[in-house]
Amino acid sequence: MMITPTMIALNNVYYQYRAELKHHAIKQPMPTCIKMHFDLQIGKGERVVVIGPSGAGKSTLLNLIAGFVQPKAGEIILDQQDMTQIIPGKRPVSMLFQDNNLFEHLTVAQNVALGLKPSLKLTPAQQQSIATILAKVGLADQKNRYPNQLSGGQKQRIALARCLVQHRPILLLDEPFSALDQALRFEMLSLVNHVCDEFDLTLMMVSHYLDASLAQFTRCLVVNKGEIVFNDKPAELYQPKYSNIATLLGINCKD
């Protein structure tokens, strides 16, 4: 039996930050400490969806892996290497957000090129790499257009191409398709699955959708109050033994 190597490991990772919450009695912001704890292993090539209530810590989980926030304690191991103290740009991770962060004054090809070289001074090999990635995401004939000339789905394809051109083995998606209609969202999910196959990527995606899209992932994590409270196949969410998780998410279990 082949053992799948671990691509992402969070070993007793603790994170905390201070937030201001309104007190119902005095109606004044009250400082409070939000604490989170993650212990997790994800194998190479897995496709994991992360769901849970708003403010539960889903995006924080991805930001810890990407290096945009630092843990108070614990280890973050990525592709068999300790990345706990490594800056985001040096981690084997690319991340796509809901806001695609495209530059309107740059062409499609130039926006993708930023993933390789912010100066946009590319070698012929890099230019060919960009052309190849644009073809993979179906934008080969749009390379000289500008973002304001494209649809929402096409813009997200540009942002995805910018991630892929970096050729990093871990792809993190933080609700990137929530602004798209259902048909386009499923189309983008299909594209993501295709590129994960082609580039042998390990995927983690934050989503707030509890529909058929869950079936496209090998595993589901439910995050609540800064902890992982469910870690299993998506279909298991609907089993009676997880009725407490179903109640949390507002879904119906099987009889």
Image (cartoon, rainbow, N blue to C red):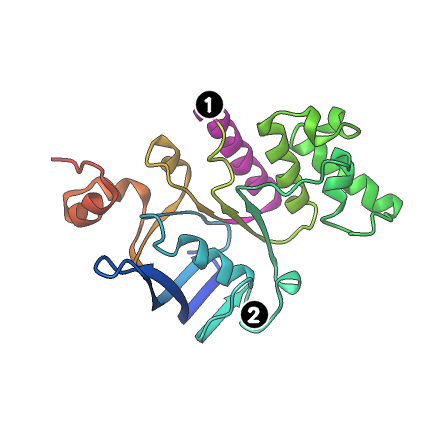
Residue 68 image offset from top left, x and y in percent: 55, 62
Q: Where does the magenta region start and end?
A: 181-203
Direction bottom: furthest residue: 73
- Looking at the image, is mark 1 or mark 2 nearer the viewer? 1
Between 105 and 3, the residue placed more toward the observer is 105
Q: Does the magenta stretch include residue 187?
A: yes
Q: How far apart are marks 1 and 2 (CA)?
A: 37 Å
Q: Callout 2: helix, strand or loop?
A: loop
Q: Is residue 99 visible from the viewing direction of this image?
A: yes
Between 30 and 217, the residue placed more toward the observer is 30
Bin the neighbour count of mark 1 within 10 Å (Cα to Cα): few under 14, some 14-19, many 20 and up.
Answer: few
- Residue 100: name its quadrant: top right
Residue 183 image offset from top left, x and y in percent: 46, 23
Tell me which label, 1 or 2, sits earlier in the chain. 2
Question: What residue sits 59% from the left and 39% below the top?
Answer: 195
Q: Do the residues labelled 1 and 2 touch (CB within 8 Å)?
A: no
The residue tagged 2 is 83
Between 234 and 251, the residue placed more toward the observer is 251
Question: What residue sits 61% from the left and 44% below the top?
Answer: 199
Can you tell which mark lies on residue 183?
1
In this rendering, the answer to whether 74 lies above or below 101 is below
Query: Disc 1 residue type?
Result: Ala
Q: Callout 1: helix, strand or loop?
A: helix
Query: Disc 2 residue type?
Result: Met
